[in-house]
Image (cartoon, helix red, strand yellow):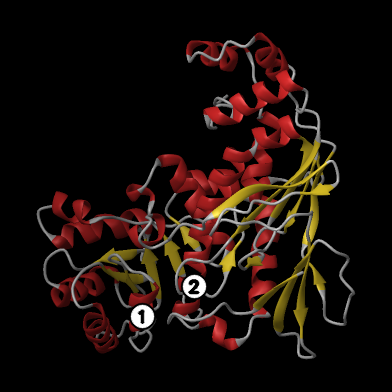
Amino acid sequence: MPPGPALLTDRYELTMVAAALADGTAARDCVFEVFARRLPHGRRYGVVAGTGRLLEMLPRFRFGDDELAALRDQGLTDPRLLDWLADFRFGGDVDGYAEGELYFPGSPVLSVRAPFAEAVLLETLVLSVLNHDSAIASAAARMVTAACERPCIEMGSRRTHEESAVACARAAHLVGFATTSNLEAGRRYGVPTAGTSAHAFTLLHDDEESAFRAQVAALGVGTTLLVDTYDVEQGIRTAVRVAGPELGAIRLDSGDLPTLATRARALLDELGAHRTRVIVTSDLDEYAIAGLMAAPVDGYGVGTSLVTGSGAPAAGMVYKLVERDGVPVAKRSEGKNSVGGRKSAVRRHDADGVATAEVVTSEPVLARDGDRELLVPLVRDGALCDDRSARELLAEARAHHARARGALPAEAFALSRGDCAIETLTA
């Protein structure tokens, strides 16, 4: 059993709990909300992702003997705090946007209601999961759009932390990536996996033909052969000679991809391999994918640009106290202000079902035709509201995202910098 998530947090969460226990404020009824003040520069919408992973961790957020010993080793020795942590079980309520939903500046994507000590203890875990997964999903959604229904393969495992790799694969699949190279994502979440060979396999053999024959013997003629280790044209000719015209695909991983893909398609057709697909990789992002739109490409492998900060800029979500004992409270710091009171949120749509605005308010919303409530119950009295498997929940999130994104206006999918896809109305 891997260690639980209780220590995946910041020390100041515990010092706040200790102080609140000492002065009697720990039990005050509080509401914290998660929101982003703005989207990354030029982005037109964000995607909520990570909710399922967060809810998986919540029942295991416990302080056992090992965790308490680690706290003592780090100088957290307050007996009252340690006794409280030993008995800690989150018993509050959580509401949030359904995983896969779209969000905009000010969207209350998660709301936690609990006694102060219980709610504040979750802050770091909530933000680390939602900020990471939402950033990946938001970037991946742009790549799916740029691909224009051609499949995308997530293959960034070697460019990030081993656990981040699993989360990245999950988030990418949520927004439409077809497969991942990561086997653990396949085991945990049922994400379809794919992968054949790298250049090392070709270099292992005395010549390219020997490598191709070995791969086809092991994986069949439907495999994908990597043809750019030496000379692309000769690699394609060798691949078709070895596998025949029913070869599944070739992969191009370097060079001028639009030109190489065009030449590759022509040569494959000349050799009778009309159904052999052309897959391209090599540090692709949404702009590179869009640049290949006119090229005869059948699929894209995406790695570094998706799983690193340059391709998936930070979501910038924060976790703020907005209500205390039923009274709205708000932060007034310049540039970091918040809006007090527990929020409700609806997405407005026109008669054609196209999203036109998001209404976020601490007052009751007067419902209109076409309004869709965005906040759904996730946890009640500490118990998860949905006990379906991780695989089932991911499949539902994927379907929900497709529906939500399908309601966006056409201009939302432009890759150029611009305003948010819809306006957020705050009251």
Q: Position of residue 32 (x, y in %)?
A: 71, 46
Quadrant hosting residue 334: bottom right
Of residues 207 and 320, the one nearer the viewer is 320
Amino acid on which disc 2 is placed? Arg
Please state, as top left, top right, bottom left or bottom right, where the N terminus lies in the image. Answer: top right
For residue 15, say whether it is visible: yes
Q: On the image, numbered disc 1 is attached to which residue?
A: 297
Which image quarter: residue 308? bottom left
The residue identified by callout 2 is 43
Say which element carries label 1.
Answer: loop
Mark positioned earlier in the residue sequence (1 or 2)? 2
Q: Nearer the viewer, residue 269 or 43?
A: 43
**Which percent across, then down, holds residue 228?**
18, 68
**Residue 177, visible in the rendered structure:** no
Rendered location of residue 126, percent (x, y)? 61, 43
Mark 2 neighbour class, 10 Å CA radius: few under 14, some 14 to 19, many 20 or more: many
Determine whether, in the image, residue 345 is placed left or right of residue 6: right
Q: How many marks?
A: 2
